[in-house]
Image: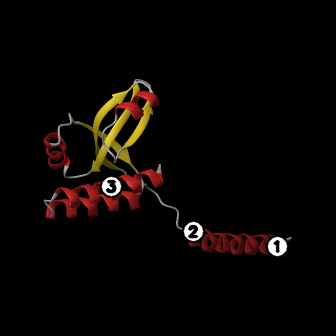
Amino acid sequence: MKNMILSIFICLIIGLTMSFYLFRQYDIPTSIEVEKLTFLQIAVYSDMESLNKNININQYIYSEEKDGIHVYVAITKNNAELLKTFFEQKGYTVYLKEFTVSNENFIKEVENADLLLQQVTDEKSIMAIIREVLEKYEVIS
């Protein structure tokens, strides 16, 4: 009887030890990084037909929501006012909308783009940076 209890006890210790090492191999993220990003909205359309008919900008993304199709022309973390002024000077009415994003790679892309935006002043460079961010967003969405 004592040998049987001793054998069971040894098996339990071996099993617990092995499970400890097996579970330790897997890196399970305990939290997901979430950041608030600012999307610059220039219009809301009732349907795709009116969007295609009335949109007068080449670079944009859109989101179909309950109240219509929202058109966004830029995404930023730190340069919302700079980009808002840029698009307002081009004749657009801009609304700033904050959304949370959990894709760490995309957040880093936006942060890098923000650094570049602070260093350039010409329209062509600004539009190129904006285009890159919008293309990255289309890939993740």
Judge from the rendering whether residue 81 lies leftward or rightward of residue 129; answer left or right: left
The extreme right residue here reads 1
For marks 3 and 2 on the same chain, the one whose residue lies earlier in the sequence: 2
Q: Distance between the residues labelled 3 and 2?
A: 38 Å
**Helix, strand or loop for disc 1:** helix
Q: Name the residue under label 3.
A: 131
In the rendered image, residue 120, in percent from the top left (x then y), is placed at 15, 63
Above or below, 119 against 83 in this view is: below
Q: In which quarter of the image is residue 94?
A: top left
In the rendered image, residue 74, in percent from the top left (x then y), is placed at 29, 47
Q: Are marks 3 and 2 in contact (CB under 8 Å)?
A: no
Above or below, 99 against 128 in this view is: above
For marks 2 and 1 on the same chain, the one whose residue lies earlier in the sequence: 1
Q: What residue type is labelled 2?
A: Tyr
Q: Which amino acid does label 3 sit on?
A: Arg
Q: Could you say which disc has been placed on residue 65 in the image?
A: none
In the rendered image, residue 58, in percent from the top left (x then y), is placed at 34, 46
Q: Residues within 10 Å of mark 1 (few under 14, many from 20)?
A: few
Q: Which amino acid does label 1 sit on?
A: Lys
Foreground mark, 3 or 2, reads 3
Q: Could you say which disc has been placed on residue 26 in the image?
A: 2
Q: Which of 52 and 139 is in front in this view?
A: 52
Q: How far apart are marks 2 and 1 (CA)?
A: 37 Å
Name the residue at 84% across, 72% down.
Answer: 4
Q: Which of 18 and 118 is in front in this view?
A: 118
In the rendered image, residue 53, in percent from the top left (x then y), is placed at 39, 31
For marks 3 and 1 on the same chain, the one whose residue lies earlier in the sequence: 1
The extreme front residue here reads 53
Q: Could you say which disc has been placed on residue 2 in the image?
A: 1
**Helix, strand or loop for disc 2:** loop
Judge from the rendering whether residue 37 lies leftward or rightward of residue 13; answer left or right: left
